[in-house]
Amino acid sequence: MTLKCDLQYGKGDASYKLTRVGVRNVRKPVVVHREGLGETLNNTLSCAIDIYVDLPADQKGSHMSRNVEVLNEVVDESIRHPITAIEDLAADICRRLLVHHEYAKNAEVHISAEYYKVNKTPQGRDTFEIYTLYAGGTIVRDGPLTKTVGVRAVGMTACPCAQQTVTEMLEYSGDMPVMSHNQRNVCTLMVTMPEDVSIEADDLIDLVEASFSSPTFELLKRPDEGQVVINAHRNTRFVEDVVRQVLDRFVKRYTDLPDSVQVDVVSDSEESIHKHDAYAERTATLGELRAENQ
Amino acid sequence: MTLKCDLQYGKGDASYKLTRVGVRNVRKPVVVHREGLGETLNNTLSCAIDIYVDLPADQKGSHMSRNVEVLNEVVDESIRHPITAIEDLAADICRRLLVHHEYAKNAEVHISAEYYKVNKTPQGRDTFEIYTLYAGGTIVRDGPLTKTVGVRAVGMTACPCAQQTVTEMLEYSGDMPVMSHNQRNVCTLMVTMPEDVSIEADDLIDLVEASFSSPTFELLKRPDEGQVVINAHRNTRFVEDVVRQVLDRFVKRYTDLPDSVQVDVVSDSEESIHKHDAYAERTATLGELRAENQ
Amino acid sequence: MTLKCDLQYGKGDASYKLTRVGVRNVRKPVVVHREGLGETLNNTLSCAIDIYVDLPADQKGSHMSRNVEVLNEVVDESIRHPITAIEDLAADICRRLLVHHEYAKNAEVHISAEYYKVNKTPQGRDTFEIYTLYAGGTIVRDGPLTKTVGVRAVGMTACPCAQQTVTEMLEYSGDMPVMSHNQRNVCTLMVTMPEDVSIEADDLIDLVEASFSSPTFELLKRPDEGQVVINAHRNTRFVEDVVRQVLDRFVKRYTDLPDSVQVDVVSDSEESIHKHDAYAERTATLGELRAENQ
Amino acid sequence: MTLKCDLQYGKGDASYKLTRVGVRNVRKPVVVHREGLGETLNNTLSCAIDIYVDLPADQKGSHMSRNVEVLNEVVDESIRHPITAIEDLAADICRRLLVHHEYAKNAEVHISAEYYKVNKTPQGRDTFEIYTLYAGGTIVRDGPLTKTVGVRAVGMTACPCAQQTVTEMLEYSGDMPVMSHNQRNVCTLMVTMPEDVSIEADDLIDLVEASFSSPTFELLKRPDEGQVVINAHRNTRFVEDVVRQVLDRFVKRYTDLPDSVQVDVVSDSEESIHKHDAYAERTATLGELRAENQ
């Protein structure tokens, strides 16, 4: 028996286009092979994937199962031929979506995965730290494909303003940085670019971690713990400073990228002295950032 | 001792504008008085509030505490003079932000709160159901204020396609709607408009609930439970249909609103047959929707 | 037509008793009246309620809708006669559950709600701060009813060990407390007792807040911010200290409570120097705590 | 310079024992090698790990960093010698904790990880589905070690009672199962046992999935989708039935396990007709379950 439900191709009772139709939070293991990647510990990434295409006004439904079929194809292929970066996977999925959804004008994919990377404490001890990788792709039929590479890292900020206030209140005039409030800062950097441009997620992680008052570490024995605290207080940063540090490092590091690259930086500070978070964000093209940095 | 930390007014080490700087998830109780609102049960709304202003390139930090000062002012006033709608509160906060942050060119506020509303089961039993209210405001200095009214409701959809497939597989030819998969659908409707236009959040809730296969209820005795199931299966809807139903009801209900009103509808279906969600979304101006509905 | 589904009373295909059967996360607004409670801002508490009864081996199903019926009864009554404490509501629900579920031997109720309370900053400024209230009840048929009153508060700890390490590393010999890492600490205190004993949730909140290195506040102008930071660093606490401070204050404050009272304290420290949390917990009867405190 | 902060060994200001002190949500990648495990896709499990030891009354602090040191040791070893099951890792960590925390009387470890497993749709198509694995260990100094193996699976239930009510309301007398409400059911099975007993997590997953009205699948083409819906409606289950089905399959499958084995089953039904969840739970020893099943 060949079953066919063609309801999707029929006309819905209300004819409006839909901007995005798809599936969210599909979970798939993806096999990755990248040199210098902490390879053994990241060779299978457990990815959360969102997939969308648009839907014309005269079609009742999108063929939802085709989204997961496309996913299964690329995941199966990754087992035989490990991919090198999840942004390439996102681009690959985008292209296949337009083939499978012949009625769609554009397609969009978002992938996120937990990721481990080797780091070094101030005293030189090796650690594995956890981050989140993001990747995305958008494509317009007969148009170019745009891809996104992003990272999320958790670090630490110490407040310059509270430090100055305390210095005044305690009338301290020595050269030791005094106490301040410090807390977890969660910073996300997303870079959207033409398909032929490449950026290493590992480099973005390094760049974000250098922008905190200090990176944080899972294991800190006594002298390392003291050093992280001292480093953070010698290097106080507002939540705004973290965003600007990321922007500045990005502009200086990627001098070869085209002006059209889109850069989004978000910094969220889980204030130790408040129950709410402080927040800063910049959304700009690389061209705009370069102009401001003259 | 007059303590002053003027670090914020100083110049940061990297001069980039910031798009949004502020505080997130500040929790405040707001006293509301609205007739016909299920008044006793909603006279204090526990609001989660996000506040942002922009920051010029030559200023190191935003004055974060001013955001909470503004919030405290409007909350204190609400105790003496209960407000009638949280979107008015959002608009009020926006204006005050530009006064307190003399360096900012624009301000943005988002508020969300849990909300209870009287509803009726198919058999006519009164119930209190829970929803989420959203309100927002954005303002550009010397420019107009735009406000947002939004609602989130949880209902139920039954799938038309699986129903047709099962009908074929079981070779059923009677007139009873057969089984299908059905599940929670979470639908959000956000309307952004000029300040002088008004929309009742209660009306938006009614409009969204009418767009599911069936609303859901906290208490269903036997005949009501059966009726909800029958209603949903006589009224099958794709996740796409829910969005289009909301759009269509909105276009027909609000004929007096200007074309510039922005309408965003999201429907998320927590598929009973899958571990992932199905999703549909439309983002459009009311003018665009009216043109498609000719 | 009288519809009856008696499947629940039938025998299931596998005869095992069930420990707990019920509904979770039912949301209800409850009207509360308590003097000195920040009354205007807490007169409606939006409660999340879990309800369970046990189920004998020879009965297929529990009558789930009776749980919500009981809830609706007590919520409706609270509109006409506001309750004074949600632990009384939990006790009331417990008793009614055993009436409605004639087959059950025991019943259990958990309630949580967001709650605002007036506090004072170090400089004496009034603030409203957010907390979580917990209440619970358990009853055995023909046996006594036990109730739970609990609170959750977010405060701040500064680490004594990192402070000492930094003092040594910087060879500082003055009398100013030096920098350390500090962070949000989330502390929960749950007290379970016979029904005729009473404890004020407000007192528990005060007791928990006094046990941090410092309470935290939503609005801190400059001198208050500096004072909170100084207070926390003069009053350094391990995550373990917070639990012991709560225990000690509790033992000293509630000398009249019976030894059988159960005390559970949990402290969770969102470490600013790590990506993971530090944690400490004590579970004991008041009698055990008194014996340790000789 | 040898830095030493011996504050932890000092006496705190309030002398109470602490039940559990440790670290939570430490994230570590663990290399696993198990035959027949969908090996390529699970060779690195990203684990969330909680570690606790008790603390005597006369010691101020636990040595938190030793917990992470122990973790790093076992993770490093897993890179060279992949482990075969995370419950063995939990047991290993428990033993080492008592060595490193010479003052502790007991130790406790919890591990969870996302896990993919091959499954087959009704029509025989291969799929990869996502589950959660749990593992745990507890040890008392000079006493035995107890370990836990657990799984969490998402499936589907269709309600037998609503089906019967609808059948009556529509006066249907054919032999087709009629419509009902159906929804996601999240079921967790945890088994705690002596160290020398072994259970395969894969077997527990199979056992839980057989206890739903139907398993769910990420990809269902038309006939598979119809078949899943039909299977679920021919196999209606209350949330209570899911727990009892799991118990019954467990008792029949594991006839060799000792009576002392602890079995905990939780089933949570995300009701499509309500905004709240239905819930059922059994906590028992295998001996108790065997006695009830006579």
Image: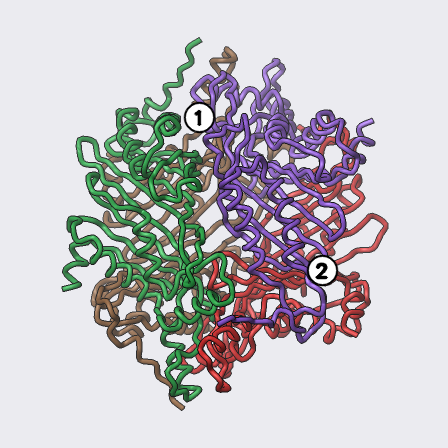
Chain colours: A red, B purple, C green, D brown
Chain letter for mark 1: B
Q: Residue at x 46, y 45 (%)?
A: D153
**Neighbourhood count class around disc 2 (C-alpha, 10 Å): few under 14, some 14–19, many 20 upward:** some
Residue type, numbered disc 1: Leu
Q: Which numbered marker is on residue A283?
A: 2
Q: Are marks 2 and 1 on the same chain?
A: no
Vertical position of residue A3 compared to residue A226: above or below: above
The quarter of the displayed image where residue C103 is located: top left
Q: Which numbered marker is on residue B219?
A: 1
Q: Which numbered marker is on residue A240?
A: none
The answer to whether one can see residue D84 in this image is no
Mark 2 in CB contact with mark 1 (< 8 angstroms): no
Of circles 2 and 1, which is in front? Answer: 2
Which residue sits furthest right?
A: A142
**Residue B85 at x, y percent in the picture:** 59, 36
CA–CA distance between discs 2 and 1?
46 Å
The quarter of the displayed image where residue C138 is located: top left
User: Circle 1 sits in a helix, a strand or a loop, which is it?
Assistant: loop
Residue type, numbered disc 2: Thr
Vertical position of residue D256 compared to residue B86: above or below: below
The quadrant of the rendering that contains the C terminus of chain D is: top left
**Residue C177 at x, y percent in the picture:** 39, 78
Q: Is residue C12 left or right of residue D114?
A: left
The quadrant of the rendering that contains the N terminus of chain D is: bottom left
The answer to whether one can see residue C22 in this image is yes
Q: Residue at x 32, y 62 (%)?
A: C211
User: Circle 2 sits in a helix, a strand or a loop, which is it?
Assistant: strand
Q: Residue at x 29, y 74 (%)?
A: D99
**Residue A12 at x, y percent in the picture:** 73, 27
Q: Is residue C236 left or right of residue D117?
A: left
Chain letter for mark 2: A
